[in-house]
Image (cartoon, rainbow, N blue to C red):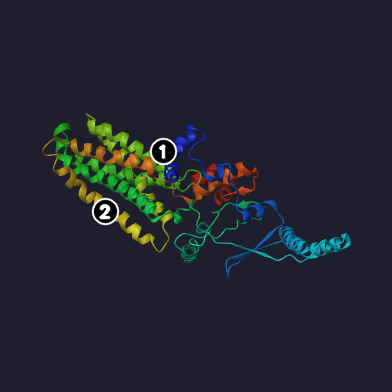
Amino acid sequence: MADYIRDAPLGQLIRFVTRNKYLQYPEEKPDFKLPDAWITVMNNPDAIIDESPANDNAVLTGTALASSASSTVAADEDTKVKGEGEKNNGDEKRDNDDIERADPQPIRLHRSRSPQETQAYTADRLEADEQHDVEKVKSIPVVPKRTKDGSILVDWYYSDDNENPHNWTNNRRLGVSLIICLYTFVVYTSSAIYTSSTEGVMRAFGVSQLKATLGLSLYVLGYGIGPLIFSPLSEIPRIGRNPVYIVTMFLFVIISIPTALVNNYPGLMVLRFLQGFFGSPCLASGGASLGDIYSLMALPYAMMAWVSAAYCGPALGPLISGFAVPAKSWRWSLYESIWASAPIFILMFLLLPETSGANILLRRAERIRKLTGNPRFMSQSEIDQRHMKVSDIAVD
């Protein structure tokens, strides 16, 4: 449970306030040790990783193998010498010379292709997902790749690494999916929920029906424009998905309060536009969040639930407000938006983890560099973007 809270916005806030004293990641704990394969690659720059597509194994050769093989043979020789009794110094020296001349036996290390190394929604991604589904039950060590410039590519430690969203338990993934679907449902419902208040707006502000319906039109315009900004931001590994979700949903809830209380028509229209604008990230990135945690084989089922939530929102919005608006006032439809969105924001703040694998690996790379003092550990996103300029990102 501590890991769930740590990965949610609440946990990240606690870590920031306490300077990472509580809810620590494995790399921040005193007893943490990098996997042996990672230490070997780090300490032996001349070691060669030969990747074989046929069996996805890697053979590590070079100085690392020589030292490893020598120590192995030496240990066997020591056992043999103790069993046979004492020998003269000349024999021991000759034995040691034989050990040093022994040909190293290749150490076979598993090199599992990460889904992050493939293009989304391709045959390669499907193959990588199928391979991962088989391997994640075996806890196979993953050998990090080395780039041409000597950087060590930070990846998952094992095929069943708990930090990998694809390895989360079914209940955790179900919980994330439920939050995303509720988030989407509330934002879409808040668009059509206003339709029951159209006549009340006409009477309250003395406007025509055309002007009154702008409350719906501007909301839709807002959530049409918003993804043009927020969706690309969520794809930047340095930012991730959660900051965009949390900040915009917080603003959505705050803006919903004056929207329900405003006493002039222009203010109502502006606030309705801002509601749609800040509620828009889930409409474009909700499916991407589901793609972060599900393989291609299971993703269609999750997408079906998410799309259903999106379609049910506009359909049920007028029904939800239709019973209260005639009995109370036109503002009740906007009150209901507050009542629906505020609990969802709290749920997101407490329990919604970061799902972007690129963001998770980037933060892991930063922790490993701090732990080892070795600047060669880098995530794929850091390697891709280290030569990019702000202007390049803006143009893209």
Which label lies toward us, 1 or 2?
1
Displayed quadrant of residue 294: bottom left
x and y, in percent, of residue 164 in the image: 48, 53
Q: Is residue 145 left or right of residue 344?
A: right
Q: Which residue is tagged 1?
A: 10
Residue 327 falls in which quadrant of the image?
A: top left
**Which amino acid, mark 2?**
Tyr
Q: Which element type, helix, strand or loop, lies under badge 2? A: helix
**Residue positioned 30% across, 48% down in the render:** 182
What secondary structure is found at the residue carrying circle 1? helix
| Crowd around label 1: few <14 · some 14–19 · many ≥20 (10 Å) | some
Q: Nearer the viewer, residue 161 or 296?
A: 161
Q: CA distance from mark 1 to mark 2?
A: 30 Å
Q: Nearer the viewer, residue 348 or 75?
A: 75
Q: Which mark is residue 311?
A: 2
One can see residue 393 in this view: yes
Q: Position of residue 293 (x, y in %)?
A: 42, 55
